[in-house]
């Protein structure tokens, strides 16, 4: 089966900083793939590169189609949809309006609603129903500034779904969520993927990533240092070293699988 995403040899430099060095990453059809790594490892840069927001070398195929040379809006139109690490909601629009301007293709909004709600396709399904997935219906008329950080994150994900993704890229969706909210988000993401929406999940919440992903890639200093099932990654000595530092001392007091907060020097 054609992979949802196939990125090969992705390299990005910012001046002297080699943020990504020949990263190969595949999201198989119907798979939930995790991308983890310490702060500054290059995770967000990878999403920026494959969505076309930063210039990169290498190739990107979406459902078998070479999109490497396409501008960001064309890639998005083909269904490569991301969320942002820092929340990017329109603060002068209501939650509902934020979804309405997501640029969703109606047929795909319906498809997402269908897989989420397990219904037969219906033409009149709306972004409102995507809000329903995250129990956000009652805040649809609210301004985003009135919502908690956690709920704003959920609106960001709902907005991405309303855009009609064929591949969903989530950059730290659980940041700002409490343990219960994160667990709930994990179950919803798993359900979305199981119903056919391939997803790349970046997060520092190791319980979430190790708990729900089919496979995981680990980045460190712009390179893939490990790739495998959650169990394989959990016990990989290189991964432990990346998180704990070569000395074996936890950085900033972090213990695996928790993650050091401070960005390390390169
Ligand atoms: N626009 C930019 N200009 C210069 N350097 C950048 C830029 N964006 C990222 N970098 C650098 O590239 C490296 C990778 O950063 P990136 O944000 O991709 O890491 P990350 O894995 O997403 O980290 P975090 O977990 O903190 O979000 C870092 O050294 C960062 O400082
Ligand atoms: Mg990041």
Image: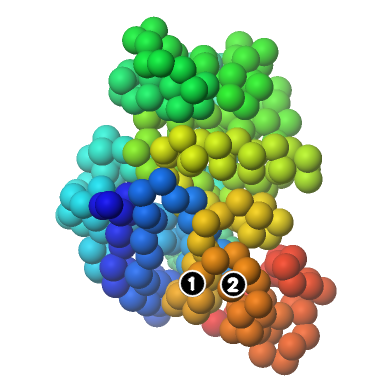
How far across and how far down the image is residue 209, in percent? 62, 56
Residue at 78% across / 45% down in the picture?
Answer: 179
Q: Are circles 2 and 1 on residues that touch, CB within 8 Å? A: yes
Please, is residue 264 above or below residue 210 in the view?
below
Please, is residue 138 above or below residue 230 in the view?
above
Please, is residue 139 above or below residue 74 in the view?
above
Residue at 27% across / 52% down in the picture?
Answer: 1
For the C terminus, the quadrant is bottom right
Q: Residues within 10 Å of mark 1 (few under 14, many from 20)?
A: some
Residue 9 in view, yes or no: yes
Colouring scheme applied when the structure was drawn: rainbow
How far across and how far down the image is residue 235, in percent? 65, 77
**Which label is found at residue 233?**
2
The reply, left or right, for residue 114 in relation to residue 22 is right
The residue carrying mark 1 is 227
State the CA–CA distance, disc 2 to disc 1. 7 Å
Q: Nearer the viewer, residue 7 or 189?
A: 189
The reply, left or right, for residue 60 in relation to residue 138 is left
**Does label 2 or label 1 sit earlier along the sequence?**
1
Q: Nearer the viewer, residue 115 or 153?
A: 115
**Which label is found at residue 198?**
none
Judged from the image, the secondary structure of the residue bearing numbered disc 2 is helix
Residue at 44% across / 50% down in the picture?
Answer: 31
Judged from the image, the secondary structure of the residue bearing numbered disc 1 is strand
Residue at 61% across / 51% down in the picture?
Answer: 212
Q: Residues within 10 Å of mark 2 (few under 14, many from 20)?
A: many
Q: Nearer the viewer, residue 47 or 145?
A: 47
Could you say which quadrant of the image residue 153 lies in? top right
User: Is disc 1's CB within 8 Å of ligand 1?
Assistant: no
Q: Nearer the viewer, residue 257 or 70?
A: 257
The reply, left or right, for residue 249 in relation to residue 235 is right
Residue 263 in view, yes or no: no
């Amino acid at each position: 089966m054609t992979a949802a995403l196939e990125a090969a040899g992705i390299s990005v430099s910012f001046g002297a900083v080699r943020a990504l060095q020949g990263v190969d990453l595949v999201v198989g059809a119907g798979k939930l793939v995790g991308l983890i790594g310490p702060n500054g490892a290059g995770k967000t840069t990878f999403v920026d590169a494959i969505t076309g927001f930063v210039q990169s070398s290498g190739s990107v195929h979406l459902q078998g189609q070479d999109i490497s040379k396409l501008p960001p809006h064309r890639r998005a139109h083909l269904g490569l949809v991301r969320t942002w690490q820092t929340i990017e909601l329109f603060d002068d629009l209501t939650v509902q309006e934020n979804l309405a301007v997501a640029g969703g293709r109606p047929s795909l909004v319906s498809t997402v609603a269908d897989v989420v709600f397990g219904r037969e396709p219906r033409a009149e399904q709306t972004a409102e129903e995507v809000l329903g997935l995250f129990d956000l219906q009652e805040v649809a008329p609210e301004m985003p500034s009135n919502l908690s950080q956690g709920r704003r994150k959920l609106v960001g994900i709902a907005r991405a779904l309303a855009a009609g993704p064929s591949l969903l890229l989530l950059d730290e969706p659980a940041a700002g969520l409490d343990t219960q909210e994160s667990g709930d988000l994990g179950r919803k993401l798993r359900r979305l993927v199981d119903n056919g929406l391939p997803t790349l999940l970046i997060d520092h919440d190791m319980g979430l990533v190790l708990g729900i992903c089919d496979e995981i890639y680990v980045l460190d200093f712009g390179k893939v240092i490990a790739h495998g099932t959650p169990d394989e990654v959990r016990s990989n000595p290189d991964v432990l070293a990346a998180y704990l530092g070569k000395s074996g001392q936890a950085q900033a007091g972090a213990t695996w699988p928790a993650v050091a907060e401070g960005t390390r020097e390169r």
